[in-house]
Image: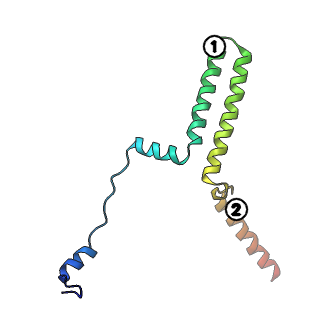
């Protein structure tokens, strides 16, 4: 028995119990969670799709002014959506390095050559 009067086997069993299992989220639940966390990205995607569809319809109706306006708005909506996406993930978390392994190997070779040149 333990100090609190409970049998020793009960305390061991309670401390070794497996953690509670979480039910995996369905696609709709994942989508809704993402929408709540980052609402402007899906709104931008819908706006982009609307401007694209409206522009294509204007091309079919042979209204070049409206079609051009819709295509410009589509580009603007795409830019805004990308901007919001970048804002949500954080620009500081994006690796803008081009071919990072190549750059590191090149830098190491240059340092190695510089070390040999001093000797």
Image coords of residue 79 (percent x, y): 68, 38
Q: Residues within 10 Å of mark 2 (few under 14, many from 20)?
A: few
Question: Which residue appears at 23% of the width and 79% of the height?
Answer: 11
Classify mark 2: helix, strand or loop.
helix
Residue 84 located left or right of residue 112: left
Q: Which residue is at 77% across, 78% downward?
A: 115
Judge from the rendering whether residue 94 lies leftward or rightward of residue 19; answer left or right. Answer: right
Q: Which residue is mark 2?
A: 103
| Residue on which disc 1 sits | 60
The circle drawn on residue 39 is none
Q: Please provide percent x and percent y for residue 36.
A: 51, 45
Check the picture and name the quadrant holding the C terminus: bottom right
Q: Earlier in the sequence, mark 2 or mark 1?
A: 1
> 10 Å neighbourhood of mark 1: few (<14), some, or many (≥20)?
few
Front residue of 84 and 61: 84
| For the residues bearing labels 2 and 1, Cβ distance under 8 angstroms | no
The residue sitting at the top extreme is 61
77 lies left or right of 17: right
Q: Is residue 105 left or right of residue 42?
A: right
Looking at this view, name the residue that lies furthest to the front: 4
* Coloring scheme used: rainbow
Looking at the image, residue 49 lies above or below residue 54: below
The image shows residue 52, relative to residue 64, as above or below, that is below
Residue 85 spot, x, y in % from top left: 62, 46
Depth order, front residue of 98/91? 91
On the image, the x and y values in percent for residue 8 come to 19, 83
- In the rendered view, tell whether residue 71 sits above or below residue 57: below
30 above or below 1?
above
Foreground mark, 2 or 1, reads: 1
Report, in whole angstroms, how far the alpha carbon at label 2 lies from the one at label 1: 49 Å
Front residue of 51/43: it is 43
- Residue, x 77% and y 73% (percent of image)? 113
């Amino acid at each position: 028995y333990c100090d609190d009067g409970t049998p020793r086997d009960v305390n061991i069993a309670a401390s070794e119990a497996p953690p509670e299992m979480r039910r995996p989220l369905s696609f709709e639940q994942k989508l809704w969670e993402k929408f709540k966390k980052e609402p402007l990205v899906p709104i931008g995607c819908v706006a982009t799709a609307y401007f694209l569809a409206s522009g294509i319809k204007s091309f079919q109706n042979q209204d070049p002014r409206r079609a051009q306006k819709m295509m410009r708005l589509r580009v603007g909506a795409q830019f805004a959506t990308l901007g919001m996406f970048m804002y949500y993930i954080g620009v500081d978390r994006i690796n803008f390095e081009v071919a990072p392994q190549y750059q590191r190997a090149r830098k190491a070779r240059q340092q190695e050559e510089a070390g040999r040149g001093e000797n």
